[in-house]
């Protein structure tokens, strides 16, 4: 009964398209051959079946799924193709309505539970989108300026202040800022500090004051400032 309600038999299809049943079967055999060559599951389109004629003989027929009807309709053009499309769509709509009518009525409790579950799923989906949006949204211009200011004050402090020789040395000064920004980009795995996710802005603010230059740069800073040892 389930299969009858969800498929259209090839004899009915033959009536819809105004062809003999054997011609429809021949068409489907060709289509099934192409599907097999493409390693596509035949049962999603056509299901082999049988029927008994008036004399009691058991003869082959094919049950068309909705996808099978759609595929078969592509072989027809013009008015005939349109008429078949309208016919099978109407037929499947009838089946859909019959299935709905056959379903037992839902109690108020079940309806409330279904509504609550649907609401919960929708809420979870919204929260997931918000979390994703928050994670993917990058810092704004105000937050960038705060990072720039904090990087500047941190680097100046490490260089020994604005009056230090290391700060006045353009090469060391530039290397220090580059080193700080490069370490920041590496931590957050971004191409530019401006691409830091907004959700991790506070983490960046906490991290910047802890920046330490690499050993080579620290040695250059110490040498410029007249400090003889790294340790």
Image (tube, rainbow, N blue to C red):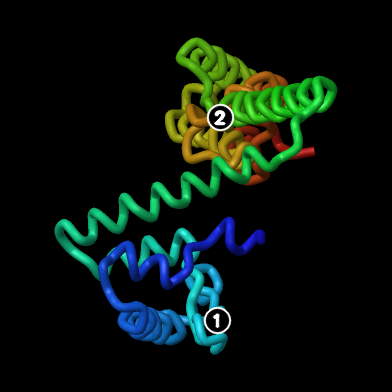
The residue at which mark 2 appears reads as: 196
For marks 2 and 1, the one nearer the N-term is 1
Which residue is most to the front?
A: 55
Residue at coordinates 27% horizontally, 73% vertically from top-left?
19
Rendering coords of residue 18 (x, y %) = 26, 68
Residue 73 placement, left or right of 10: left
Residue 11 placement, left or right of 121: left
How crowded pointer 2 is (Cα within 10 Å; few <14, some 14-19, many 20+) is rated as: many
The residue at which mark 1 appears reads as: 52
Up/down of 163 relative to 101, above or below:
above
Nearer to us in this view, 38 or 176: 38
Residue 130 placement, left or right of 38: right
Residue 128 has which mark? Answer: none
Residue at coordinates 80% horizontally, 38% vertically from top-left?
231
- Residue 158 in sight here: no
Up/down of 86 relative to 53, above or below:
above
Nearer to us in this view, 208 or 173: 208
Identify the element where label 2 is drawn.
loop
Rendering coords of residue 224 (x, y %) = 57, 32
Which residue is most to the left?
A: 78
């Amino acid at each position: 009964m389930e299969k009858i309600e969800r498929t259209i038999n090839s004899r009915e299809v033959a009536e819809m398209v105004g062809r003999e049943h054997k011609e429809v079967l021949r068409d489907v055999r060709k289509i099934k051959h192409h599907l097999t060559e493409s390693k596509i599951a035949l049962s999603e389109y056509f299901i082999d079946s049988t029927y008994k004629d008036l004399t009691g003989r058991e003869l082959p027929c094919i049950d068309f799924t909705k996808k099978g009807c759609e595929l078969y309709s592509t072989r027809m053009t013009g008015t005939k193709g349109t008429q078949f499309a309208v016919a099978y769509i109407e037929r499947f709509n009838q089946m859909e309505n019959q299935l709905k009518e056959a379903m037992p009525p839902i109690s108020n409790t079940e309806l409330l539970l279904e509504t609550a579950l649907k609401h919960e799923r929708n809420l979870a989906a919204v929260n997931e989108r918000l979390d994703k949006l928050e994670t993917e949204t990058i810092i704004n211009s105000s937050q960038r300026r705060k990072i720039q200011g904090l990087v500047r004050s941190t680097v100046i402090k490490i260089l020994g202040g604005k009056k230090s020789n290391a700060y006045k040395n353009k090469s060391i000064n530039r290397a220090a800022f580059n080193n700080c920004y490069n370490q920041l980009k590496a931590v957050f795995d971004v191409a530019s500090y401006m691409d830091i996710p907004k959700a991790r802005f506070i983490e960046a603010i906490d991290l910047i004051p802890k920046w330490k230059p690499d050993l080579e740069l620290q040695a250059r800073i110490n040498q410029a400032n007249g400090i003889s040892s790294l340790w």
